[in-house]
Image (cartoon, rainbow, N blue to C red):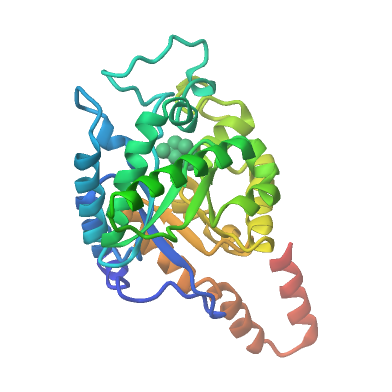
Amino acid sequence: KNHLLRSLKDTPATTPDGINIKLFANIGNANDMEQAISFGAEGSGLLRTELLFMGRDALPGEDEQFEFYKAVALKAKGKPVIVRTLDIGGDKQLPYFNFPTEQNPFLGYRAIRICLDRPDIFITQLKAILRASAFGQLKIMFPMISNIQEVRAAKVILQQAKDELTKAGITFDKNIPVGIMIEIPSAAITADLLAKEVDFFSIGTNDLCQYTLAVDRMNEQIKDLYDPYNPGVLRLIAYVIEQGHKNNVEVGMCGELASDSKATLLLLGMGLTEFSMSATAIPEIKNIIINSLLVAKEIHQRVMEMDSSALITAYLQEITL
Ligand code: PEP
Ligand code: MG
C-alpha cells in the first residue's frame, strides 16, 4: 500500500470536483525539505526555526542563520517555504537563554512575546530570513499571536530589518508575504480583524487545542481531554477558515490535525485548501483528497442498479442517517 501511495508523488492533490489542494511539509532544516519533496510536498507550510537554536550553547548569529535559511530555500527549488520566527519557551527551552521561573510556562514568556521583548534577537533573525529570501520563495510567520498589537509591533521590527538591509545594499524579497499562526483562541475569534494585517493564516491545532480546552498538551494524565474533535475547537477552526477567505487571506493548517486522515474530508468541507504535515503523511492524505468523491460515486453506482424509487429512497435514507 505504501508503494502505491508513493506512486502518487507527482499527482496533484486535486479533489474530484476540481479544487486544487496544497500539501506542504512541516520541516526543521534543509534535509527535511529535500525529503519532503521526495514525498510530493509542494513546499513547506512550517519551518520550525527554533530547532536551529536548540542543542547548542549560544545564540546563532545573523550569518549562520542566513546560511541555514538559504540552504532550506535552495532545497525547496522555488517552492514556497513558510519560515516561522522563534517559537521558544513552554516545552522548548534553550540552555544558554535565561528563562524566568514561571508557574505556567505555556501561558508565559514565550515565542513572539520573547521576540518583542528582545528586539535584538528578533531583528537578527528577521534580517537573516530576509537575506535568504533572495534565494527562494520564503514567507515569514509569527507564532503565538494573541492580539493585533503584537502583529503590528512585529511588522514594525520587520520593516526596521528591511530598512537596515536596504541601507546596506543587500537584496531581499521586498514583498515577502507575512502571516501569523492562529493557535490562541483570542486570535481565532478575531480572525476577521487580524486578517487586515497579514497575507496569510496558519492554524496551529496543537496549541489551539491546548488553549481552547485548557488541557496541557504535554500532560499524560489528561490526554483524553486533549481532543481536537471537541466541537469548540472545530467551530474555531471553521470560523478562521471562513473569515480568512472572506477577508482575502490564505488559510493553511500546520498542526497535527492536518495529517489526521479522519479529519481530511471535514477540513475540505470547511474549505481548507492548504495542509502542512510531516512529509511521510502526505501520500495518505493526498489519496483521500483525490478520492474524496468516491463515496458519492459509489452511492451513485449502487442507486443506478436499483429498480424502484422505493428501494432508492430507502437506501438513501439509510445512508443519510
Ligand atoms: C501548533 O501549535 O499546532 C504548531 C504547529 O506549532 P508547535 O507544535 O510547534 O507548537
Ligand atoms: Mg504552536
Q: Which quadrant: the N terminus?
A: bottom left
Instruction: Report the side of 31 relative to 175 (left or right).
Output: left
Above-or-below relation of 209 to 317: above
Q: Residue at x 54, y 75 (%)?
A: 19
Q: Which quadrant: the C terminus?
A: bottom right
Q: Residue at x 61, y 26 (%)?
A: 214
Residue 256: give x, y in percent of width and height.
45, 45
Asked where in the image residue 49 lies, by quadrant, the reply is: top left
User: In this orientation, which residue lies closer to the viewer: 131 or 94?
Assistant: 131
Residue 27 visible in the current orientation = no
Q: Residue at x 43, y 43 (%)?
A: 160
Instruction: Report the side of 30 relative to 86 (left or right).
Output: left
User: In this orientation, which residue lies closer to the viewer: 173 or 308?
Assistant: 173
Residue 309: give x, y in percent of width and height.
79, 86
User: In this orientation, which residue lies closer to the viewer: 68 or 304?
Assistant: 68
Asked where in the image residue 42 lies, by quadrant, the reply is: bottom left
Residue 23 visible in the current orientation = yes
Residue 210: give x, y in percent of width and height.
55, 31
Asked where in the image residue 149 lies, by quadrant, the reply is: top right
Residue 284: give x, y in percent of width and height.
38, 61
Above-or-below relation of 147 to 310: above
Count of numbered circles on the image: 0
Q: Residue at x 76, y 70 (%)?
A: 317
